[in-house]
Amino acid sequence: MVHVRVLEPADLDAVVGLSLRAWAPVFASMGSVLGPRLDAMVNPQWESAQAAAVRAVCEERSPHVYVAELDGTAAGFAAVALHDDDAPEPGSGEIEMIAVDPAYQRRGVARALIAACTEAMERAGCRFAVVATGGDPGHAPARAAYDAAGFTGLPLVRNYRALGPDPAG
């Protein structure tokens, strides 16, 4: 059974590691869509950038960062941002980051984390919940989890174009 709790400082290295394992196929998918030149521009050294982003979010969002344990192991994590009246979407809560270790996917970890996040948002008085994800094939499992949790997808498109000459010729 999945147990969700608030992140503790001792969890940080495990959370960073599982997030990088979870997001490796996502970044590979985005790279496939973007192509090598644009991918090198958009996602250079994604591992170190994501590791730093996860650490920063975990430190900034406490106590709104959750760890899901399965079999006594950190199997996933999620971070919630609460938006006040000055935010672009006032009165909302956002699942800012979520990741499930590939070894624990399809076992209810994402469902438990999403539930913990939305319950925290409700307790904080948020009127609605938001989560963003990509439209590429690597994000398909995330989109399915959000759909199953009752989120309504609004397709947005972010377009990329390389500028200048291609250094590869």
Image: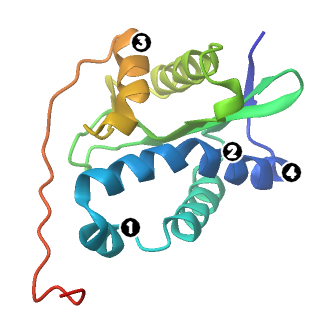
Q: Amino acid at mark 3?
A: Ala
Horizontal and vertical percent position of residue 120 = 54, 25
* Residue hosting label 1: 43
Q: Nearer the viewer, mark 2 or mark 3?
A: 2
* Residue at left offset 57%, top offset 38%: 99
* Residue at left offset 38%, top offset 67%: 43
- Contact between marks 1 and 3 (CB within 8 A): the answer is no
97 left or right of 150? Answer: right
* Residue hosting label 3: 149
* Residue hosting label 2: 18
Q: Nearer the viewer, mark 1 or mark 3?
A: 1
Instruction: Work out how far the residue at label 4 is from the one at label 2, CA to CA, in angstroms.
Output: 14 Å
Circle 4 residues within 10 Å: few <14, some 14–19, many ≥20: few
Q: Amino acid at mark 4?
A: Ala
Q: Nearer the viewer, residue 64 or 66?
A: 66
Q: Nearer the viewer, residue 12 or 157?
A: 157
Could you say whether the residue bearing mark 3 is in a helix, strand or loop? loop
Instruction: Work out how far the residue at label 1 is from the one at label 3, CA to CA, in angstroms.
Output: 29 Å
3 left or right of 21? Answer: right
Circle 3 residues within 10 Å: few <14, some 14–19, many ≥20: some
